Image (cartoon, rainbow, N blue to C red):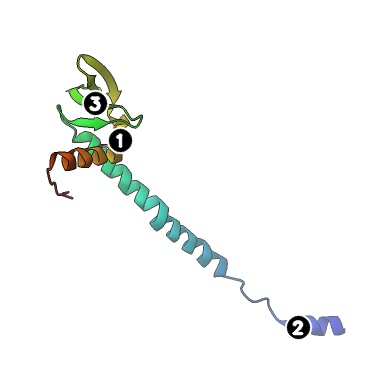
Amino acid sequence: MQFNQLLLQAGAPAGGGLTPIFLMVGMFIVMYFFMIRPQAKRAKEQKKFADSMNVGEQIVTTAGIHGRINKANEDGTLQLEISRGTFMTVDRSAVSMEMTTAYRKKTDAAAGITTTAVK
Protein backbone atom coordinates (compact mmCIF):
# COMPACT_ATOMS: atom_id res chain seq x y z
CA MET A 1 0.00 0.00 0.00
CA GLN A 2 2.79 2.41 0.82
CA PHE A 3 4.48 1.66 -2.50
CA ASN A 4 1.36 2.64 -4.45
CA GLN A 5 1.08 5.86 -2.47
CA LEU A 6 4.72 6.73 -3.26
CA LEU A 7 4.10 6.18 -6.97
CA LEU A 8 1.04 8.41 -6.90
CA GLN A 9 2.93 11.15 -5.05
CA ALA A 10 5.84 11.01 -7.49
CA GLY A 11 3.58 11.86 -10.45
CA ALA A 12 4.48 11.63 -14.12
CA PRO A 13 8.14 11.81 -15.12
CA ALA A 14 9.25 15.27 -16.29
CA GLY A 15 10.62 15.94 -19.78
CA GLY A 16 8.44 13.53 -21.71
CA GLY A 17 6.31 14.38 -24.68
CA LEU A 18 7.57 16.88 -27.25
CA THR A 19 11.06 17.60 -25.90
CA PRO A 20 12.88 14.86 -27.90
CA ILE A 21 11.10 15.97 -31.08
CA PHE A 22 12.21 19.58 -30.58
CA LEU A 23 15.78 18.41 -29.98
CA MET A 24 15.81 16.36 -33.19
CA VAL A 25 14.39 19.26 -35.24
CA GLY A 26 16.91 21.63 -33.67
CA MET A 27 19.81 19.29 -34.51
CA PHE A 28 18.63 19.04 -38.12
CA ILE A 29 18.40 22.83 -38.44
CA VAL A 30 21.92 23.27 -37.06
CA MET A 31 23.28 20.60 -39.44
CA TYR A 32 21.55 22.27 -42.38
CA PHE A 33 22.94 25.74 -41.72
CA PHE A 34 26.46 24.64 -40.75
CA MET A 35 27.07 21.69 -43.06
CA ILE A 36 24.61 21.11 -45.90
CA ARG A 37 23.96 24.69 -47.05
CA PRO A 38 27.63 25.82 -47.25
CA GLN A 39 28.59 22.63 -49.09
CA ALA A 40 25.82 23.13 -51.66
CA LYS A 41 26.87 26.77 -52.11
CA ARG A 42 30.50 25.74 -52.64
CA ALA A 43 29.47 23.10 -55.21
CA LYS A 44 27.42 25.69 -57.08
CA GLU A 45 30.38 28.10 -57.18
CA GLN A 46 32.69 25.30 -58.40
CA LYS A 47 30.27 24.41 -61.22
CA LYS A 48 29.97 28.07 -62.24
CA PHE A 49 33.79 28.35 -62.23
CA ALA A 50 34.19 25.18 -64.32
CA ASP A 51 31.67 26.40 -66.88
CA SER A 52 33.30 29.82 -67.20
CA MET A 53 36.81 28.61 -68.13
CA ASN A 54 37.99 29.77 -71.55
CA VAL A 55 40.80 28.94 -73.95
CA GLY A 56 44.08 30.60 -73.03
CA GLU A 57 43.52 30.72 -69.27
CA GLN A 58 46.17 29.45 -66.90
CA ILE A 59 44.73 26.86 -64.47
CA VAL A 60 45.78 24.42 -61.75
CA THR A 61 44.25 20.94 -61.44
CA THR A 62 43.39 19.23 -58.16
CA ALA A 63 46.51 17.10 -58.66
CA GLY A 64 48.64 20.26 -58.77
CA ILE A 65 49.33 20.27 -62.51
CA HIS A 66 49.70 23.77 -63.95
CA GLY A 67 48.73 24.39 -67.53
CA ARG A 68 47.10 26.66 -70.07
CA ILE A 69 43.79 25.69 -71.67
CA ASN A 70 44.47 24.94 -75.31
CA LYS A 71 41.08 23.55 -76.33
CA ALA A 72 37.68 23.00 -74.71
CA ASN A 73 36.19 19.72 -75.96
CA GLU A 74 32.47 19.01 -76.37
CA ASP A 75 32.54 16.05 -73.98
CA GLY A 76 33.35 18.24 -70.95
CA THR A 77 37.10 17.84 -71.08
CA LEU A 78 39.88 20.37 -71.53
CA GLN A 79 43.12 20.02 -73.45
CA LEU A 80 45.91 21.59 -71.40
CA GLU A 81 49.32 22.61 -72.61
CA ILE A 82 51.57 21.90 -69.64
CA SER A 83 54.80 22.73 -71.43
CA ARG A 84 55.64 23.74 -74.98
CA GLY A 85 54.28 21.01 -77.24
CA THR A 86 53.10 18.78 -74.35
CA PHE A 87 49.34 18.37 -74.10
CA MET A 88 47.15 16.64 -71.59
CA THR A 89 43.38 16.06 -71.50
CA VAL A 90 41.60 16.54 -68.16
CA ASP A 91 37.99 16.72 -67.05
CA ARG A 92 36.58 20.16 -66.23
CA SER A 93 35.79 18.99 -62.71
CA ALA A 94 39.50 18.26 -62.15
CA VAL A 95 40.32 21.97 -62.16
CA SER A 96 40.67 23.35 -58.64
CA MET A 97 38.88 26.65 -58.12
CA GLU A 98 40.77 27.48 -54.91
CA MET A 99 44.23 26.62 -56.26
CA THR A 100 43.60 28.40 -59.58
CA THR A 101 42.41 31.63 -57.94
CA ALA A 102 45.34 31.53 -55.49
CA TYR A 103 47.75 31.01 -58.40
CA ARG A 104 46.19 33.88 -60.35
CA LYS A 105 46.42 36.22 -57.34
CA LYS A 106 50.06 35.25 -56.84
CA THR A 107 51.01 35.82 -60.48
CA ASP A 108 49.03 39.07 -60.65
CA ALA A 109 50.76 40.33 -57.53
CA ALA A 110 54.14 39.43 -58.97
CA ALA A 111 53.28 41.27 -62.18
CA GLY A 112 51.97 44.28 -60.26
CA ILE A 113 48.39 43.89 -61.46
CA THR A 114 45.62 44.68 -59.00
CA THR A 115 42.34 42.86 -59.47
CA THR A 116 39.05 43.09 -57.64
CA ALA A 117 36.79 40.11 -57.17
CA VAL A 118 33.32 40.50 -58.60
CA LYS A 119 30.60 38.36 -57.06
Q: Which mark is residue 96?
A: 1
Place of residue 70 in the rendered image (x, y in percent of width and height, measured from the top left): 17, 22
Amino acid at dot 3: Gly
Task: Give the mark nearest the N terminus, 1 or 2.
Answer: 2
Q: Which mark is residue 67?
A: 3
Q: Which mark is residue 26?
A: none
Amino acid at dot 2: Leu
Evaluate whether residue 48 shows in this view: no
Label count reads 3
Which is nearer the eye, 46 or 21?
Answer: 46
Return the residue at label 2: 8
Q: Could you say which quadrant of the image residue 32 lies in?
A: bottom left
Amino acid at dot 1: Ser
Relative to 6, is 16 above or below?
above
Label 1 secondary element: loop
Label 3 secondary element: strand
Relative to 51, is 72 above or below?
above
Place of residue 111 in the rendered image (x, y in percent of width and height, measured from the top left): 14, 39
Labels 3, 1: front one = 3
Evaluate whether residue 17 shows in this view: yes
C-beta proximity under 8 Å, tags 1 and 2: no
Label 2 – label 3 distance at C-alpha: 79 Å
> Residue drawn 14% across and 49% down?
116
Label 3 – label 1 distance at C-alpha: 12 Å
